[in-house]
């Protein structure tokens, strides 16, 4: 029984991953009407809350926290590395930022948050 439930759960997670990968290919403006429809659904409202605008703001705040944390981690990593000068460390961090931005620009062709 446990193996069957475990397999079912793994399959479900795989399907969710595939769906979300497909959604990333769509422009955010195409997804927004669907998000509004879902957020106005009574089941969604009763269990999660129906304020899509607040949810998007929370997403934006969470993304900013994540980026700040990644930045601090990268700067600390470069400081601990101790190779070369401080200028070299900052240049490596700057190059890392550029690479990350290019990746996000490829993934999200439209601006997601304000």
Image (spheres, grey):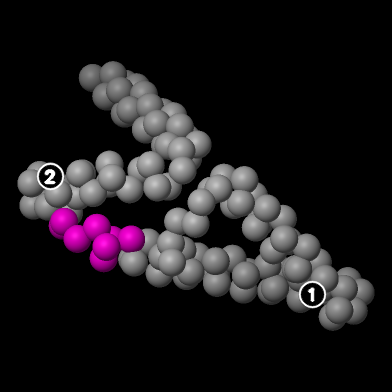
Residue depth check, mark 2 versus mark 1: number of the one nearer the observer? 2
Could you say where residue 107 lies in the image, as x and y percent from the top left? 57, 45
* Closer to us: 60 or 7: 60
Mark 2 or 1, nearer chain start:
2
Label at residue 90: 1
Could you say where residue 87 lies in the image, as x and y percent from the top left? 86, 79
Where the C terminus falls, by quadrant? bottom left
Q: Are marks 2 and 1 in contact (CB under 8 Å)?
A: no
Q: Residues within 10 Å of mark 1 (few under 14, many from 20)?
A: some
Q: Residues within 10 Å of mark 2 (few under 14, many from 20)?
A: few
Q: Is residue 105 left or right of residue 14?
A: right
- State the predominant SS element of the stretch in magenta: helix
Dot 1: element: helix
What span is colored magenta in the figure? 49-56
Label at residue 11: none
Q: Residue at x 34, y 66 (%)?
A: 57
The answer to whether residue 84 is above or below residue 25 is below
The answer to whether residue 62 is visible is no
Q: Residue at x 68, y 53 (%)?
A: 102
The answer to whether residue 100 is visible is yes
Could you say where residue 78 lies in the image, as x and y percent from the top left? 76, 70
Q: Residue at x 79, y 75 (%)?
A: 90
């Amino acid at each position: 029984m446990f193996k069957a439930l475990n397999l079912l759960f793994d399959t479900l997670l795989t399907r969710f991953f595939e769906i979300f990968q497909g959604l990333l290919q769509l422009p955010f403006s195409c997804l927004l009407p669907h998000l509004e429809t879902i957020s106005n659904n009574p089941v969604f409202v009763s269990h999660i809350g129906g304020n899509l605008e607040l949810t998007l703001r929370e997403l934006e705040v969470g993304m900013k926290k994540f980026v700040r944390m990644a930045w601090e981690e990268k700067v600390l990593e470069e400081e601990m590395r101790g190779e070369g000068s401080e200028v070299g460390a900052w240049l490596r961090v700057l190059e890392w930022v550029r690479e990350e931005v290019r990746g996000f620009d490829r993934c999200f062709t439209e601006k997601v948050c304000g």
